[in-house]
Image (cartoon, rainbow, N blue to C red):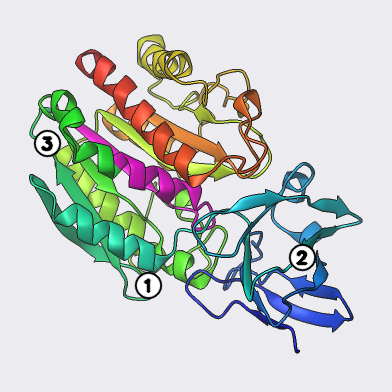
Amino acid sequence: MTIHINAAFDGGNIRLVAIEGDRVDLEIVRDRESDFFQWFYFRVAGARGRQLTFRIVNAGESAYPFGWPGYKTRASTDRHAWRMIDTRYEGGVLSFDYRLDAELAWFAYFAPYTMEMHDALVARTALAPGVVHRQLGTSLDGQAIDYFRIGSGDKPVWLYARQHPGESMAEWWMDGALAWLTSEAAAPLLAKATVHVVPNMNPDGTRRGHLRTNAAGVNLNREWHAPSAERSPEVLCVRNAMDETGVAFAIDVHGDEAIPANFIAGYEGIPNWTEDHGAKFYEFGRRLAAHTPDFQVEKGYEKASAGNANLSMSTNQLAQRFGAVSVTLEMPFKDHDPNADAEFGWSPDRSQALAVACLEVLTGMIDEL
């Protein structure tokens, strides 16, 4: 039988270089009009009963090669359960072995959340009582920027994800958040807050299989100071909607390639920084760490020094623009090592559960914002 490698589907990304016996050499394709690449997602057919060695030969040229050591590829035969498999990184090549005991197998950087899955999430959420849906605008490829308004309280809360489309755990988080927000459990929060949700900021990059950019090769999380219809209509329409509502609290949901833990980053260094403003951000992190073993506050990014915050990034822009308690949430492609799972690592289920934990902590803090 002939081995077939295919990534010509929603969110797929890989290029076949060569097949020599049981060795399959591959390359990850760069984001369009960009040098970013790291996300991969592909299917293998025609190899049942064989053990193959897969080698991603350009891994060392990827956007974050320091993220490969300690990383484990996700594999699935049903596209529902994504298990970690042993993965090696040496000499700029990422490699893993896999015996195909089924007709088909899929491999991905992380459990995918495709645009078809996004459309299903939007459809079921829009049917829930009390939910208002709007299309805020369209992407460069003409896809909808979907938005939900839930609740009637005075405090405007914004949740948005997938600025970087290869960070699929971010929309798994949104899946869990929207399920909770449309349940009875959310009633205490929704009495005091109106929650505005954009589950996918970058539908073009998601469908195209990009790591970090939109259809024009633009990193959306460097556009918040001056978004434009030509480069970043996705940010433009969302920021315009935020200007209409104001923002008291916001979570921008991401994934991190290198750090094996969940953590948050804030807005230290903005011109309008005050200790009282920052204290509310730190308190959210402390309460979240106390609330779930799947969060910690020891590991994270270096803080910007006074006056040196990058206002093109959404968290800094919203904290400066609105005085918001603005949070960047990062989840790992590896595992949350302080509370590890040897089979699945950091996973869709855990991403969904972390969303609930975040919103439960927010409920307890809403009066303080």
Residue at screen point 26% across, 15% down: 364
> Which disc, if any, is residue 99?
2
| Disc 3 packing (10 Å; few <14; some 14–19; many ≥20) | many
> Which disc, if any, is residue 229?
none
- For label 2, the SS is strand
Q: Does the magenta stretch include residue 316?
A: no
Instruction: List x then y, in percent, for residue 104.
Output: 62, 74
Amino acid type assigned to the residue bearing label 3 in the image: Gly
User: Which residue is situated farthest in the bottom direction here?
Assistant: 1
Residue at screen point 25% across, 21% down: 363
In this view, the residue in front, 226 or 63, is 63
Instruction: List x then y, in percent, for residue 80.
Output: 49, 58
| Disc 2 packing (10 Å; few <14; some 14–19; many ≥20) | few
In terms of image quadrants, where is residue 45? Answer: bottom right
Q: Earlier in the sequence, mark 3 or mark 1?
A: 1
Position of residue 77 in the picture relative to residue 356 (left or right):
right
In terms of image quadrants, where is residue 236? Answer: bottom left
**Mark in the foreground, 2 or 3:** 2
Measured Cα–Cα span from mark 2 to mark 3: 49 Å
Residue at screen point 72% across, 69% down: 100
| Disc 1 packing (10 Å; few <14; some 14–19; many ≥20) | some
Q: Which of marks 2 and 1 is nearer the N terminus?
A: 2
Q: Mark 3 points at which residue?
A: 151
Position of residue 161 in the picture relative to residue 91 (left or right):
left
Magenta stretch bounds:
155-177
Q: In this view, does 277 lie above or below 34?
A: above
Q: Name the residue under label 1.
A: 140
In terms of image quadrants, where is residue 6? Answer: bottom right
In this view, the residue in front, 358 or 179, is 179
In this view, the residue in front, 320 or 93, is 93
Measured Cα–Cα span from mark 2 to mark 1: 40 Å
Position of residue 368 in the picture relative to residue 1 (left or right):
left
